Image (spheres, rainbow, N blue to C red):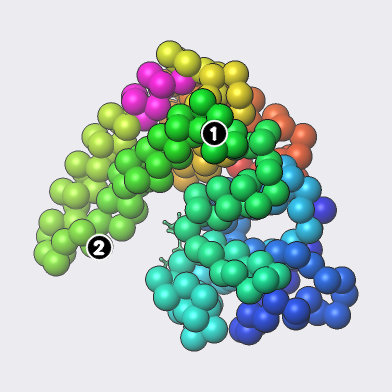
Amino acid sequence: MYTTRQWSGGHFPGDTGGVTRLTYTLYGNYSTATFGPHAVLEEADLPYTLELIDLSAGDNHAPDFLAMNPGGYVPVLRCEDGTVLFEAAAIMLYLADQHQLTDLAPPPKDPTRGLLYRSLFFLTSTVQEAYKHFYYPMKFTAERSAAEGIKEQSIQLMVERWAMVEQMLDDNGPYFLGDRFSLADIYLVMLISWHDNMESILATNPAVKRNFDLVTARPALQSILRDHGITA
Ligand SMILES: N[C@@H](CCC(=O)N[C@@H](CS)C(=O)NCC(=O)O)C(=O)O
């Protein structure tokens, strides 16, 4: 169980509303990249508060928020020692390393650590890149008329990238690290949930569907999967 609060500015680590002293504050919102770090906090049963950042109200562009992440996007993690991190995958790796969550990330010297890096960075920079072009075509052109073409091309790119994911999980699944669950699988579920036609991704990629079913059946994730609106 975690606590949520509607963010109202300010970002002080000791400010826990006078209730209990909490270790982490996760700033973000549902159905966003907040899911990855949120899932790690839940899997590891770490104490935290989720501060809800209302993106539609522009909370992410408020000066207090920009002081934590000048990019103005969620999620952001604030730790008790004052460390502030943004980038979902970095937060996930950081939490796993800080708390030696070897069930989620093999330790640095483990032979499968390289595969974790490869899988995670592939998802964040290669698969997610196609999404960015689909959802934010105007960020990639100064010509309004070009946006539709960028979006069109990104659909093809997404098909290719999902085929790569399918191949990887089919060759050495059901998880990215073979029979070992990891952060990469959490990230995968998040990306699937962002797809505007999630059903078609799952229907056309059986190894991806198997991974999705395994991850979404994890007991520790049930409550936040509901909160983030992720269902098969
Ligand atoms: N690379 C970042 C991307 C985060 C991101 O795109 N966050 C979106 C929500 S999913 C956001 O906050 N968008 C608001 C904005 O950019 O104004 C990460 O993985 O953490």
Q: Residue at x 43, y 13 (%)?
A: 171
Residue 191, position as x, y percentages in the image = 47, 41
Q: Is residue 203 magenta?
A: no
Q: Is residue 226 visible?
A: no
Residue, far right:
19
Q: Pick whichever, 229 or 207, lies toward us.
A: 207
CA–CA distance in space, label 2 to label 1: 39 Å
Q: Which residues are magenta?
A: 162-169
User: In the rendered structure, does residue 164 fall within the stretch colored magenta?
Assistant: yes
Q: Ligand 1 is in which quadrant of the figure?
A: bottom left
Name which quarter of the figure residue 175 lies in: top right
- Read off the residue under disc 1: 109
Considering only order in the chain, which callout, 1 or 2, is on the residue closer to the N terminus?
A: 1
Question: Marks 2 and 1: CB-CB under 8 Å?
Answer: no
Residue drawn at point x = 28 percent, y = 51 percent: 133
Q: Is residue 88 visible?
A: yes
Q: Is residue 12 left or right of residue 151?
A: right
Predominant secondary structure, magenta span: helix
Q: Which residue is drawn at the image coordinates 61% and 83% (left, top)?
A: 9
Quarter the C terminus occupies: top right
| Mark number, residue 56 | none
* Mark 2 secondary-structure assignment: helix
Q: Amino acid at mark 2?
A: Lys
Type of amino acid at the residue the image marks with label 1: Lys
Q: Which residue is mark 2?
A: 139
Residue 105 in picture, x, y percent from top left:
60, 37
In-image side of 116 versus 216 (left or right): left
Disc 1 packing (10 Å; few <14; some 14–19; many ≥20):
few
Residue 109, compared with residue 11, is above or below; it is: above
